[in-house]
């Protein structure tokens, strides 16, 4: 076995060990500057869609307050109907806003993930092209091991 190949294998093993110890920064290791055009709207839409749930709680709370006022006799039937009908428009608006924000949130994060996966595939392919054929023969696991053993 070639000593250079063994050294390369050890250095790759150390690199993998160091990468296991990293935190959140690993998630964005393959982010390029052009990806920020997708990442920024994704983050902003995430924050905006996070505000939908508290807004829903406020609007639904007002509806239940109207029901409570009617139940204890503070509101007449006509006033109750008027209050409930006026509550429908904010709920419908919130539904449309939720659809747009969550849809945009999903689309932008999906696109960002696809860009990340593409960068990973490209870097992996480049790294595999740079390897010597001995490196593939020394593998003990994976498809490349099976291929090298079946071809000899």
Image: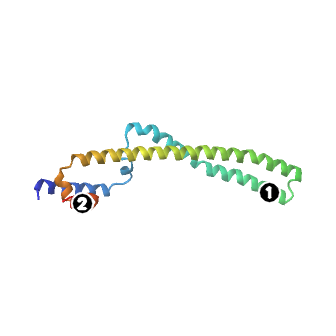
Q: Residue 151: tell me if it is visible.
A: yes
Closest to the camera, between mark 2 and mark 1, is: 2
What secondary structure is marked by label 1? Answer: helix
Q: Is residue 111 above or below residue 134?
A: above
Pick out the residue farthest to the bottom.
140
Image quarter of residue 67: bottom right
What residue do we see at 86% from left, 49% from top? 79
**Residue assigned mark 1:** 67
Q: Quadrant of the N terminus?
A: bottom left
**Taking 7 as reference, is 89 left or right?**
right
Q: Is residue 85 above or below residue 34?
A: below
**Viewer-nearest residue: 105 or 40:** 105
**Residue assigned mark 2:** 145
What residue do we see at 33% from left, 54% from top? 22
What is the number of the mark on residue 102? none
What secondary structure is marked by label 2? Answer: helix
**Viewer-nearest residue: 83 or 120:** 120
**Picture coordinates of residue 116, whole percent (x, y):** 39, 46
Please tell me how crowded label 2 is: few (under 14), some (14-19), or many (20+) other residues with Cα within 10 Å.
some
**Picture coordinates of residue 118, whole percent (x, y):** 38, 45
Q: Quadrant of the C terminus?
A: bottom left
**What is the distance, in whole Å, between disc 2 and disc 1 at their CAs?**
69 Å
**Taking 36 as reference, is 7 left or right?**
left
**Picture coordinates of residue 49, whole percent (x, y):** 58, 47
**Taking 83 as reference, is 1 left or right?**
left
Image quarter of residue 103: top right
Q: How is the image coloured?
A: rainbow
What residue do we see at 84% from left, 57% from top? 70
């Amino acid at each position: 076995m070639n000593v250079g190949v063994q050294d390369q294998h050890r250095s790759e093993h150390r690199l993998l060990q160091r990468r296991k110890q990293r935190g959140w920064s690993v998630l964005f290791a393959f982010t390029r500057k052009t990806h920020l055009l997708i990442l920024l709207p994704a983050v902003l839409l995430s924050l905006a869609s996070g505000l939908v749930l508290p807004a829903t709680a406020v609007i639904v709370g007002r509806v239940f307050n109207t029901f409570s006022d009617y139940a204890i006799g503070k509101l007449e039937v006509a006033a109750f109907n008027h209050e409930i009908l006026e509550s429908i428009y904010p709920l419908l608006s919130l539904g449309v806003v939720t659809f747009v924000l969550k849809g945009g949130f999903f689309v932008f994060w999906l696109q960002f993930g696809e860009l990340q996966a593409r960068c990973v595939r490209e870097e992996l392919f480049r790294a595999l092209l740079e390897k010597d054929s001995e490196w593939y023969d020394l593998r003990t696991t994976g498809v490349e091991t099976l291929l090298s053993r079946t071809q000899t």
